[in-house]
Image (cartoon, helix red, strand yellow):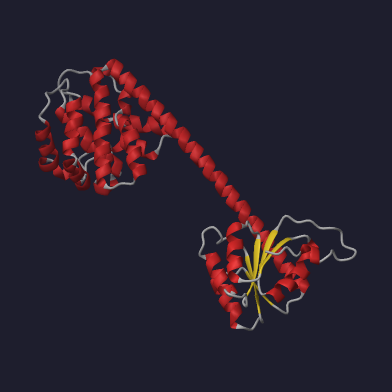
Amino acid sequence: MATPESKYPPIPGMHHVVSTFRILLAAHPRTVDRLSSALSPFGYNLDTATEGHEAQTAIQKGAWDLIIGSTDLPQMDGFLLLRSIRTNRETVEIPYLMMVGSAESQDEIKAFQLGADEVVPEKTSDVGLRARVRVLLRLSTYRRRLQNEKRMLGIKVAERTRELVEITMATVAALEKATELSDPETGHHILRVATYSTLIADKVGLSSELVEKIRLYAPLHDLGKVAVADRILKKEGVLTPEEFEEMKLHTNHGHELLMAAQADEVACNIALSHHERIDGSGYPNALKGEAIPVEARIVAIADVFDAMTTVRRYKEAIPPDVAMRTITVELANRFDTGATAAFIQRFDEVMQVFESYS
């Protein structure tokens, strides 16, 4: 590429102007000469490409504030070049000015249709040309500023997300330790439910990101039990109706704790809704069907299976195959069909987890 600044000395009487703007002149040689003559005295950093493939290479390699093209660019006309710029994610935002033969030609309409920011007839005066260039350079500045702000916002969001994950994981670790100290079997329940939930979620076909969140946050499903009295949590035998109503509040308590900690929405949904049932028979809000978040529908199956297959103060354990049949056949209307199918398909792996704690 040629750099034509030295060919055109500053206009007499003008102060020396230095600009940081980079402009690519991708045009027929005679148009390049005219543009260079009009723009060089004003300090712009000009590079030239006088045929299409050279222009494409220059665009990919450079960071341009403005591209000025012409319809009669050799090898690849200005329209094809413009199309390639506007269909490339890396270059789509670069302002583009097209030089056309006349304002009345169809070329002007075609250029705008392809995404030109400005169209200038060849007979436009240098003053008019420079005015349009200044407008497009301001546009370039605004677009770049917006991109930088979006990039900074993305960085801040990523940092905040990382902080929230760390806070949540610290909460998980603290909860697991606390429950293990007070009741080792409850600690095992947390770990099994998390593993069962991950096996189901992975088979359902959720995104890898959501599967990972379910793995991380499923251990928090019973977080709210820290607010339930020990006389209820550790009672030998079946709870009275009044005691059961108090126990049910652990879903609300867990949700409130996680909301206060600004935890991920998936964690909050699991804590609040893992006792909801597809037929509306669950709690705390009697949600039905897809009104229940998918992560809660998945943890619901894992939680019930583990409750059935382990000894509790108020009941004996039942065999895993009986629990599986109860969930998938007798109580099928209470659980998500997709999650139930995934549970059946991963049951061999579920059994491996179950036996590892036996």
Q: Is residue 157 visible?
A: yes
Say which quadrant the N terminus sits in: bottom right
**Image location of residue 133, percent across then percent down:** 71, 66
Q: Determine the residue positioned at 33% across, 19% down.
A: 178
Q: Determine the residue positioned at 51% across, 59% down.
A: 89
Q: Quadrant of residue 65?
A: bottom right
**Image location of residue 298, percent across then percent down:** 25, 40
Q: Determine the residue positioned at 13% across, 37% down.
A: 324
For the residue pair 295 and 169, the one nearer the viewer reads as 169
- Name the residue furthest bottom: 104
**Image location of residue 328, percent across then percent down:** 13, 42
Q: Quadrant of residue 43?
A: bottom right
User: Does residue 331 appear to the left or right of 104 in the view shown?
Assistant: left
Say which quadrant the C terminus sits in: top left
Q: Is residue 268 above or below residue 59?
A: above
Q: Is residue 287 visible?
A: no
Q: Is residue 273 above or below residue 230?
A: below
User: Does residue 187 appear to the left or right of 3 in the view shown?
Assistant: left
